[in-house]
Amino acid sequence: MSTVIAAMITAVVGILGTLFAPLLQQRMTARQRAEDGLTEDRRRRFEERRAAYTAMNRASRQFHTLLKDALHRIRDDVYADEDRVRLEEARRDYRDRYAEAQMIVPSGSWKRPASSIRCSPGSTRWPSGSTAACSATARRRRARCWS
């Protein structure tokens, strides 16, 4: 190969490198922005779920506290209309937070607790209350849930 051909190949490679460098840089920048956008979206969804869980947990605790207080007041025969109104407001708040969480939280998260409660390792009763059905079938079902 002569020096002229080598010089020409070098020049072509240099020109192509100069032309393609901005394209390559643009592509890498676009990819980085897309990754940053996905990371930010994941972080935003996590914060939304966290806020929904927190609000639902707080409303649930408040509702259960007022429900327990109402039960004690009914037992002591001092349950008043304002207690009933506060309890109803707490119930509505809890339902609102629950509905909000259902829209934000992935659907699979709502199904898992129900199956784990039904298949708890120490359970010896079927939901119907029958202990006769708790046999090898029940053990297989619990094993399938926990595997």
Image: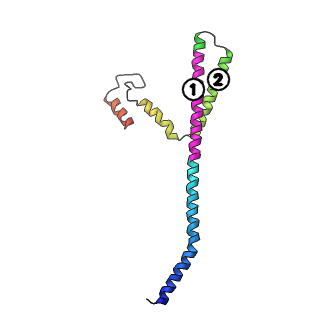
Q: Secondary structure at mark 1?
A: helix
- Which residue does the image show at 68% across and 16% down from the upper left? 81
Disc 2: which residue: 88
Do the numbered discs 1 and 2 sit on residues whose CB atoms are within 8 Å?
Answer: no
Q: Please state which amino acid type lies under the numbered disc 2.
A: Glu
Left or right for 27, reference 85 = left
Q: Quadrant of residue 53?
A: top right
Disc 1: which residue: 61
Which of the pair 28/63 is nearer the observer? 28
- Residue sitting farthest toward the right: 82
Q: Quadrant of residue 76?
A: top right
- Residue sitting farthest toward the left: 136
Which of the pair 3/21 is nearer the observer? 3
- Residue 126: x %, y % from top left: 40, 26
Residue 15: in magenta span: no
Q: Main secondary structure of the magenta part?
A: helix
- Which residue does the image show at 40% across and 29% down from the upper left? 120
Sequence-first disc among 1 and 2:
1
Q: Which residues are magenta?
A: 43-71
Left or right for 86, reference 25 = right
- Which residue does the image show at 48% across and 36% down from the upper left? 111
